[in-house]
Image (cartoon, helix red, strand yellow):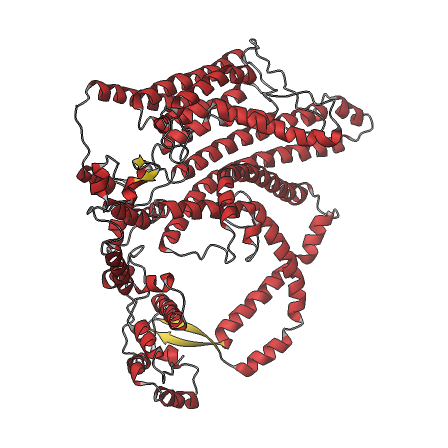
Amino acid sequence: MLNATGPPTTPDPGCDNLAVRLEYWVYATIPISVAIIFIFAFFEERVKLWPTCCFQRPAIPYPVNLVDSYNDRWSFASAFSVMSTSVLQLFWGDWIFAPDLSGIHNMLRGTILIFVGLANVLLISLVFYPILLCLRIRSTHGLTGNFVGFLYTNIWLTYNLLLIVHCGRGQGLSRNTIIALTVPVYINYTLLNIGFAIELLKAIRRNLCKVKNITVHAEEEEDYFKKTHYYERVRFLFSPPKEEEEKGLLNRLIRKIWIDAPGFRYSTRSVCTMVLSTITTYQIGLLYITIVNSLWDIPDELLKEDGLLYQAFSLVNSTSYVMEARAFFDIAEDMFWIACYFAIALAVLYNIHVQICYREHTLLLWRGVKDFCPKEKFSLPALVVANLRYSGYAIAFSAWGFVITQVVSWLLLFFVAYFIVHQLQIRVPGEELSWLLSFLEGYWLTFVMGFVFYYLQVAIANLTFLQKEKEKEREKVHLNLNNRRLFHWTVYITLFMNVVVGLVSCLMRIIKAVFFGVLFIGRIDKCTLMRGWELWDPGFKSYLGFLQLEVAHTHPVLITFCHFLWKSVGKDMREHRVPLVFWRRKPAKMVNGSNELSLVTSSGHSRKKLWPRNKWFVALTLMRNRALTVDRMRISPELQRVKEQLERERREAQSRGSDKTDTTELTIGLDEQDAKSIPVEEGRLPAADEGKKTTVDAVRKGQVSNQVPTEAEISRDSGTISPEPSRPAARLSTVAWEGQAAAAEPNHNPVV
């Protein structure tokens, strides 16, 4: 670990062969890694930097696409996982590059150690760079990528096997502990080797059985796009909703985990983060348990019956103190293991639940719903930085969450087991109670009465102070006061009573905040701060940055729309031999530093000649999609009223979908004078709003259907793309446009 006195000392690994050391293997594989990266750099094409020089080669080869990639997700997760043990060794103290800092001033030593630690991490990243690079490049250069990846992976697999063979005890750890730590690494190395071998055989077969003069037509490219989850998602949005059948408890539980969301796929980054977080938490937890478990041998040796401490107390007939100390440590050890099991189970469930929340939040962002996001918006550079921090924060928060949850739950369990349960077991009738039991005996009834008093107020409010109505077989409660005189009297009587209850409630508030804050410290998808302060939580902020940046680049509707736009120039692209599918990130043919496709369109005409037609298409699109009109044009007073009307209709439709509209609900709480005033106000309606008057009268008489159109119906009526089926949404009615037309009239007097 980092310290301010000097570089961490590398403990003796206890190996028979000193050559089986991490630093030796890192320094030996650095030249191989650099050579592989240099060779693969000529497989990449430059896009912007000197595009006409050296056939656009070489370029910087990046290891993995963690923005909008969905291919080889588990292979990349295995590649990241094999790095976990090597990185963990750095935190354990086995540094690769550890210079002597004894001659440097103490004020600068800590700062230099930070850069030394970063250098060690960069060395580990460099030597494992070729594995990720081979996984990415094998899609275009299958033979080379799989062959090099298979050989390089086996080099590091050999190191891990030699580590087990030659190291009996390493860094104070037993052989069994080392094996348990490296089991996930062996599994991932095996999966990588199997994957490289299978893909290598496929690449050899393709090269041996190559068919000459293979041309890829636009229809084949289009068929390829139809197999993507983007196309599947958009097709699902346009399909009519299906009636859901009642399913059993097991099926509902499975659907909670694997929701039926066609077109959704977990991204490469989410899968890699989940796997790496689970393995890292497992390894850190195993090290923590091993270290703490070794400490229990100390009190066992001191407090055993033939030990020196027991014999010393037996001389003065005070062995009861030794027995009490033995019971103290025995209970502490038992509660330690229970807390470990609880923390392990909680960490595993959290990693699974984070993926469920990631799926739900992604679906919400696809629909444009940002209710879970803070209202305050952070800048775009801060969003990109938050996205960069996501994976590292998720791993660190998961590891810290396990340790903190285990320690806190251990203390709570030990407190209850020793100071309450154990004291009751050893208590002799007639003896004085301990301070804790005496406190509980004197005040437990007070706590019970506090809860009874609170729930008694809830019962009185439900039975006396709220208006109710009978609706079919149940009573419906409304937020309208009943028995107001009794309510005023109750407020006065309970004013000072609730002061006493509030003193206890304030303590409970602190306890709950600490409890849930510790319980959810490992959850990066949940904010542990109060509403309005979400951006002060760095973990939650990184999660939001990851979600928003990924959705901005992988929205299926946007991808499909851009695909069809890109397809419109397919003729020119085929003539110039440029790939059709835009999301493959291949640049177009460059001539004199400019893109050929920027000069002509698919019909071969100049863009200047097609300018009026394109403007007409834009106007026609805006006329058919009113919501786009509001977002595109500058907000004038008339358009602002249209936007407010659309938002009001959406909220009203959602409220009608959550609860049926009824005549009694609208008129309850109105006295006779209010009921008479309604027709007078409606009589002032202008001619343009007579339709609204009819709607209001129909609602008052209970003649309006309570059915709310689903989003699939809206997509068919208004031409918009709906999100999930079977969910009520606001129909884009013509009221907004009628209101816009009426607003242009000089005598328009809208009724709010």
Residue located farthest toward the top when viewing the structure as drawn: 16
Q: Which of 282 and 338 is in front in this view?
A: 282
Residue 418 lies, with reference to residue 279, above or below; the image says below
- Asked where in the image residue 743 lies, by quadrant, the reply is bottom left
- Relative placement, left or right, of 389 versus 642 is right
Residue located farthest toward the right when viewing the structure as drawn: 316
Which residue lies at the image location 62% right of the left edge and 43% below the top edge?
412
Image spot of residue 120 (x, y percent):
57, 25
- Relative placement, left or right, of 284 versus 37 is right
Residue 297 lies, with reference to residue 484, above or below; the image says above
Image spot of residue 15 (x, y percent):
57, 12
- Asked where in the image residue 152 lies, by quadrant, the reply is top left
Residue located farthest toward the front when viewing the structure as drawn: 592
Image spot of residue 685 (x, y percent):
34, 85
Would residue 240 be visible to someone looking at this image? yes
Which residue lies at the image location 67% right of the left edge and 24% below the top edge?
7
Residue 374 lies, with reference to residue 229, above or below; the image says below
- Relative placement, left or right, of 631 versus 566 is right
Number of numbered discs: 0
Which residue lies at the image location 49% right of the left edge and 74% below the top edge?
463
Residue 108 lies, with reference to residue 375, above or below; the image says above
Q: Which of 440 and 63 is in front in this view?
A: 63
Q: Which quadrant does the C terminus fall into?
A: bottom left
Q: Which quadrant does the N terminus fall into?
A: top right
